[in-house]
Image (cartoon, grey):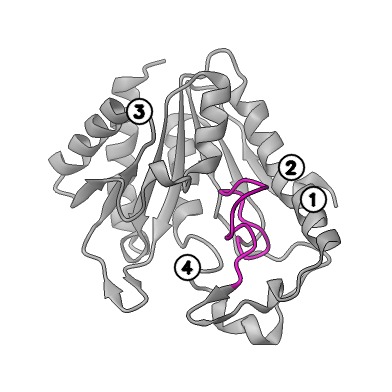
Amino acid sequence: MNPVEAVETIPGDGPILLTCEHASERMPPGYSWPAEDHRLIGTHWAYDLGAANLTRKLAKRLKAEAVLSRFSRLLIDPNRPEEGSDTLFRKDAEGAPVFLNVGISASERARRIRELHRPYHTAVATAAGREDLRFLLSIHSFTPLYEGEKRTLEVGVLFDLDEALASAFLMAFREDGLVTELNEPYSGKGGLMYCVDRHARTAGRPCIELEIRQDLLAEEGFVDRITEVIARFCERTFPR
């Protein structure tokens, strides 16, 4: 499979690199949705709704390079390591099996790693290796209702090592009136921001992952608003 099937790259020359690991629910050539998995199409299990749109708007606003996936996270999750993760190939969703991954063979696992996971990470590594790069920012979204639990959080700022930067980012969102917390609804310390953390550490750069509620990202007015909040913070903290 051509790597272009795995990765969309938006060119840019600014000091910030944007990534979007769960940008698409697309099935690349050679794959299709099993009938039993049609229930997952268009849901947060298949991709991060609204994340790609926000990433593209931010890339344009900041003139930043961006790397976005072009395959569903249910085929393979590029925000998980190749080894040691039980959700690299998700086995169940909403209490039922994910048939894309039922009985997946060792050769099929290797194929998806080779043709999807690695090309994505190669693209991020190439972009992260620029000498003028100063910050990596990963864009994700989360469902407002997860397994029956309603989430009132609007923005989560995830971090592993860069707590001071995350705290400053949090204040920027709160000053705009957004309900924001650190390491919610997931923790950046739990390996769930694997991609950006991996490439930031290799390049010696700070990194943050943002989680934004999906129902809010369905409103273009909100997308424009949060694009400005993020862009202003980035421009102030990492000027050209």
Q: Is residue 212 above or below residue 132?
A: below
**Nearer to me, 19 or 53:** 19
Element type at mark 2: helix
Name the residue at 29% across, 22% down.
236
Q: Please report whichever mark, 1 or 3, sits nearer to the chain's N-terminal start.
A: 1
- Residue 44: which numbered mark, if any? 4
The amino acid on which the numbered mark 4 sits, given as a three-letter code, is His
On the image, numbered disc 3 is attached to which residue? 162
The magenta stretch is 73-91
On the image, numbered disc 2 is attached to which residue? 119
Q: Position of residue 167 (x, y in %)?
A: 23, 33
Q: Position of residue 90 (x, y in %)?
A: 60, 66
**Nearer to me, 149 or 82:** 82
Asked where in the image residue 65 lies, by quadrant, the reply is: top right
Task: Look at discs 1 and 3 and give the one toward the viewer.
Answer: 3
The amino acid on which the numbered mark 1 sits, given as a three-letter code, is Glu
Whether the residues at callouts 1 and 2 have beta carbons within 8 Å, the answer is: yes
Q: Estimate the spatial distance between the alpha carbons at disc 1 and disc 2, rounded to whole Å.
A: 6 Å
- Residue 115: which numbered mark, if any? 1
- Left or right: where 224 falls relative to 168: right
Q: Estimate the spatial distance between the alpha carbons at disc 3 and disc 2, rounded to whole Å.
A: 27 Å
Element type at mark 4: loop
**Mark 3, residues whose alpha carbon is within 10 Å: few (<14), some, or many (≥20)?**
few
Q: Please report whichever mark, 4 or 1, sits nearer to the chain's N-terminal start.
A: 4
Q: Estimate the spatial distance between the alpha carbons at disc 4 and disc 1, rounded to whole Å.
A: 23 Å
**Nearer to me, 51 or 21:** 21
As drawn, which residue projects farthest toward the front?
A: 84
Does the magenta segment cover residue 78?
yes
